[in-house]
């Protein structure tokens, strides 16, 4: 920075007028530049007669922001290239800083991307583990359903087989009774046949029929499996628990509804147990 007194400023203005600068606006900007402490070398550039007032003002602005003097002289020779020259100057000046900024941006982006990728990878692994767990649960449930279905089919087949046997035995019994009735009609003096008088084979058949009849009355398995077939595991547990705690089949059937949740079935079971306990008291 350089300091000028009023006499120096007046002398410089007179010098500019002698060089053909008569524009009052340009002379005003030159005086303002001197009061701002612009160096004499820059003043020499600004006083070039070929420069317009606007060109001189732009060069003065560049000098204030400390553009190198060598560049100011080049701009003064070709004022129309000021934009391109300033752009090239700043690109060269700030190229290292720009590279550093770009590198910092890239590094930050890479760190953030790596963090997001690691988080996504963990979530993917968690989802994969959850999927495997659900698959194993589904396979286990399907296996249990298959076992129950095979058990039910076996029971149905066994019941059907026993029913056919009972029907055959009943038919043989009826035929025997017809035969016995005919024998009684032919021999009216003979009394009704007693069990011990029947042939040994017929006695055995009668015992089997009675046993099967008692068995069908005692065994409610087919009803129980028909009851629990549409239920889920937690619902089935409530049915079995109710039976184990003394509820009868008809009582359990009141809450063994697939539309009821396991919690609702549990509440109804507790109420039925309390009612049964109150009746006993």
Image: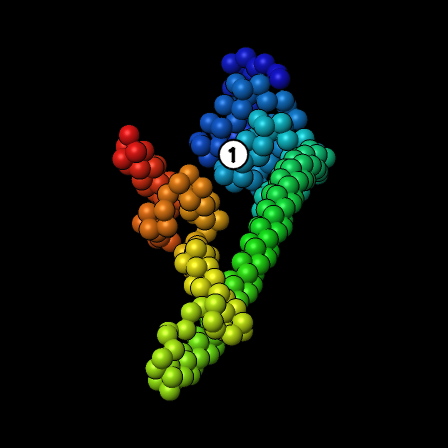
Q: Position of residue 248 (x, y in %)?
A: 36, 46
The foreground one among 264 and 102 is 264
In this rendering, the answer to whether 265 lies above or below 20 is below
State which quarter of the image contains the N terminus.
top right
- Which residue sits at x=58%, y=28%? 65
Q: Which residue is mark 1?
A: 57
Specify the quadrant of the image occupied by residue 141. Answer: bottom right
- Which residue sits at x=37%, y=74%? 191
Q: Is residue 15 shown left or right of residue 219?
A: right
In this rendering, the answer to whether 197 lies above or below 176 is above
Q: Position of residue 31 (x, y in %)?
A: 50, 23
- Which residue sits at x=45%, y=68%? 195
Q: Position of residue 120 (x, y in %)?
A: 62, 44
Q: Dot 1: within a 10 Å radius of its alpha carbon, few (fewer than 14), some, or many (20 or more) residues?
A: some
The foreground one among 231 and 13 is 231
State which quarter of the image contains the C terminus.
top left
């Amino acid at each position: 920075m350089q300091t000028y007194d009023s006499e120096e400023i007046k002398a410089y203005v007179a010098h500019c007028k002698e060089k053909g600068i008569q524009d009052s606006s340009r002379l005003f900007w030159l005086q303002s530049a001197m009061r701002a402490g612009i160096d004499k070398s820059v003043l020499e550039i600004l006083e070039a007669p070929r420069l317009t007032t606007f060109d001189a003002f732009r060069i003065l602005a560049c000098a204030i922001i400390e553009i190198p003097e060598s560049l100011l002289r080049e701009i003064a020779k070709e004022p129309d290239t000021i934009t391109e020259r300033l752009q090239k100057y700043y690109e060269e000046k700030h190229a290292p800083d720009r590279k550093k900024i770009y590198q910092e941006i890239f590094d930050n982006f890479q760190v953030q991307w790596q963090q997001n990728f690691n988080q996504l990878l963990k979530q993917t692994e968690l989802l994969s583990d959850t999927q495997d767990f659900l698959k194993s649960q589904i396979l286990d449930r399907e296996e249990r359903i298959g076992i129950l279905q095979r058990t039910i089919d076996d029971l149905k087949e066994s019941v059907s087989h026993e029913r056919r046997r009972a029907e055959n035995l009943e038919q043989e019994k009826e035929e025997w009774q017809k035969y016995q009735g005919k024998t009684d009609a032919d021999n009216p003096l003979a009394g009704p046949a007693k069990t011990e008088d029947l042939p040994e084979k017929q006695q055995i058949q009668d015992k089997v029929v009675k046993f099967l009849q008692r068995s069908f009355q005692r065994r409610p398995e087919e009803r129980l499996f028909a009851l629990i077939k549409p239920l889920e595991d937690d619902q089935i547990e409530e049915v079995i628990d109710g039976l184990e705690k003394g509820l009868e089949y008809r009582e359990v059937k009141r809450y063994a509804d697939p539309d009821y949740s396991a919690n609702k079935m549990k509440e109804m079971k507790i109420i039925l147990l309390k009612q049964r306990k109150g009746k006993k008291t």
